[in-house]
Image (spheres, coloured by chain):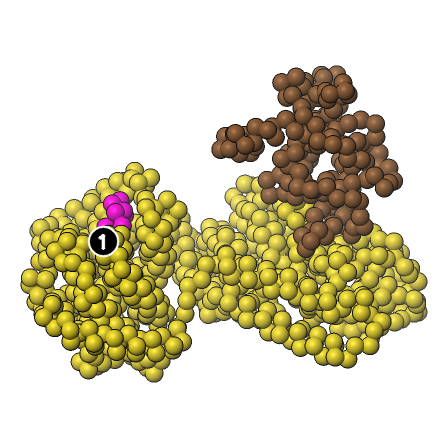
Amino acid sequence: MENNSQFDNNFESESEQLNKYLAFNIGDEIYGIFVKNINEIIGMRSFTALPNVPKFIKGLINLRGNVFPLIELRERIGLQKIPYTSKTCIIIVSFNQYSVGLIVDNVLEVVDIDIKKSIPPPQTYKGTQSKYIQSISKIDNDEVIILLDIEKLLISQ
Amino acid sequence: MDNETKEMIKSFVIESLDSLDLVEPLIENINDPNDKENINSVFRVFHTIKGLSLFFGLNNLNSLTHKAETLLDILRKNPSSIDDNIISLIYSTLDLIREILILVSNEFSDEKETNDVENMLFLLDDAIRSLQTSIGENPREIIQNEFIPNDSDAEIINSVDEGDNSENKIDDSTIQQLDSNNLISQEMIESYLSDTKDYLDNIDNMLIQLEKDPNNYELISNIFGMIHSIKGNSGFMGYGEIQDIAMETETILDSIRKNELFVESNIISILLSNTEAIRKRINQISEKINQSSNLALEEEQLSPQAPTAQIPQQKIEKQTNVETQTQEQIDSAKNQNNTPKLDIRVDTTKIDKLFDLVGELITTGNMITNNPDLAELQLPNFSKAASQLNKITRELQEITMSVRMMPLNGLFNKMKRLVRDTSLKLGKKANLIMSGQETEMDKNIIEQISDPLMHLVRNALDHGIETPEERIAKGKPETGTIHLAARYDGNEILITVSDDGEGINPEIIKKKAIERGIIDPNESNISDKDIIQLIFEPGFSTAKVVTDISGRGVGLDVVKKNIEKLQGSVDVSSKVNEGTTFTLRIPLTLAIMDALLVKVGDTVFALPLLNVIETFKTDSQTITKTMDGVEMIKIHDKLLPFIRLYDIFKIEPKYYNIEQGLVLLIQGKNEQCCFFVDELLGNQQIVIKGFSDYIGNVRGLTGCMILNDGNIGLIIDIENTLKLFENPFTIANEIIS
């Protein structure tokens, strides 16, 4: 909804971005987040742990005077946490008034996705975590990319 | 619509809203036959809005205020016919005007409100008609009795032709109103003076521009509009002389507008000398105000000596004369402009930005002066400069803070209205007694406590105060009393809402709490005081049953949540049949505090410095452990809770051993306790940051802060931490709604 209205206003200049997704790894799978929601990508860094919050919220980081919560994306989508490596990155994303950092295993590249050719998550795949999936698509080299629904990822219980 | 007109409309909206706020509390007493000033003040505000809305082409607003004015005019001649219905009607008219004004400030048009306005006009018409029949007055007469400042050309020419006569007429009536008038407050006069000065400065600039660009119609209209505002405001404030000069100026401008008069330098000079004459009077008035508060009288005394520029008479003949005079006057105006202004209007977003910047400045200042790179060095000169910097930033912070402080007056006045409306609706009788309205608070906090406070007042009426019959049966006075009070208490403000109603029956609360599974039926030893606090539990709010039986509990959890968001707290105490008191404790300001920094494991925690009584080392001899594993410490002959922060916040500490760590003696709101930490880092002024919208509130913490090394520290909420210690099972993972 939010994005649609933005596009209506400014369709010409935005249409280029319509199909651009940032691809990243979690384990062997490739995931994608719509680039409009991404502010920046930074390397993993030390953070302040926060007590008494849900497990997937790791803590807080300070980025040029602004405080961002850190979400362990693995734990958020129901996967096992693994130790951080030199490839671990934080993707700062924004949705509505929320801005958070998502911890991912490895950031790949920005890819073009043909939304028309992507499919909804298969019925059989509808586990509890599949609600975070917006759709499943393919990138150039025929690899499968799972596009995440940023709204559900941040807000859903 | 050009930007300047938009600006003018915006300032019209702001001023009108201000005046509506000022007169709103008077409406309740407009039927007081001994004090006609109440109704006159309301009348004048409607009148001013009417005139200006016509000028800006806001037709709905104009017709609405016009009709309201007609009604008020009838009423002020027949105060005895004012009843509750009429007062309610005036209130709702005022609400609609306010609504329209807010719409206008965004859209610069009032067309969207046409339906509402038509409905309201219908109601007003109805009231006017029924009044007329009951009084037997001829409607025509009423309309003639109004004086309508009209921007239509005919009107203005008319007033010029009639010359002094018509002006005197207006003057007399306003001055008469003023005689008995103590209700134009100091504040109103001050804002009038500063507004007029601003207008005059603008007009002077525009006139000079106009001289270079004589055919700029827009410019003429703008000047006309401002002069018109000065005229209207001066009339409202009772400064007839200024009103006259403004009216003359307006006439000249109107002639220019209609191409009857051409813009030449002598005309500009005349106009400038007029603004100068107004400015001179304005300055005299402000001087007088500083000396004395008896304004109306003073103004009349000073007017004869004040030099005037009678324009219509002098008009073109004395051009040369006027010109030289004007130059002098401009010079003297420049000098006068050097005297300090009473106040200026500043966009609140600018103030908020300033506030944020001061916060950043403090953080950055701390980062520099406590920079780890400098830790090992001996830098006497640097330290001197650093402490000077700290002193100045602190002063800057205090000033910035004071800018946002506002008295609670406005908020409390809203409650007056609320009590009146609600009690009428419920068929109950209640008096609202207020005290401490002059207490000042951060403007942003005032906005945020408005809803919770309204909720509490409404609750007091709805569930606290009984119906008149019940009260009589109980031997209480028929009219209930709600007391709203505010006062300072250390670093906090206390606001209490108390009623003398039926109170809260702990037995009923307890029964309900057990039914709803909020408390365990076997837990019999909860004190009544604690039971009553259960009304703040979320489970209670949704329960309609509770309202039916004992009252209270509707949305009180929301009140509590909102107040806690401000780092404040809510308390309730009650006695059956004697009444209930809600106490809000709210910190004076949110953003900055003096804190003690401590370390537990790798995490840095900050505590409000005011709450830390002392720090000391101790040994395990002083600690007693109960069989539940709860630890108590013996200190100064008292036995206090011993709270290991690493336990509460689930951190791996450096020291588990009591001998190695450090103990802080903490003063909570009602009790003392001890915190066990690894080490002390020192004290520092910190800027409180929230945990971002995403996380919201975290149990046991108020927020976070940026440390000198760029890492993030956590700020401890002492009350909340104590609660976590007393009842660790309530540690819920509350988050993300």
Residue B359 left/right relative to B230: right
The residue furthest front is B212
Query: Split into 4 quadrants, where in the image is the N terminus of chain A?
Result: top right
Residue B303 left/right relative to B497: left
Taking the magenta stretch, the answer to whether it contains residue B572 is no
Q: Nearer the viewer, residue B471 or B124?
A: B124
The correct choice, above or below, for B310 with respect to B521 in the image is below
Name the residue beneath numbered marker 1: B215
Give percent across and percent down for residue B496.
53, 63
Q: Which chain is yellow?
A: B
Give percent across and percent down for residue A149.
67, 30
Residue at 54% across, 41% down: B544
Q: Nearer the viewer, residue B618 or B397?
A: B397
Residue at 68% across, 64% down: B364
Q: Chain of mark 1?
A: B
Q: Which chain is brown?
A: A
Q: To which quarter of the image does residue B587 belong?
A: bottom right
Give percent across and percent down for residue B118.
26, 40
Query: Split into 4 quadrants, where in the image is the C terminus of chain A?
Result: top right
Say whether residue B550 is visible.
Answer: no
Say whether residue B437 is visible.
Answer: yes
Kindly report the secondary structure that dominates the magenta region of the rendered protein: helix
Residue at 80% across, 65% down: B372
Highlighted magenta segment, given as a residue range: B52-61
Q: Residues within 10 Å of mark 1 (few under 14, many from 20)?
A: some
Tell me the amino acid under the disc marked 1.
Asn
Give percent across and percent down for residue B538.
62, 45
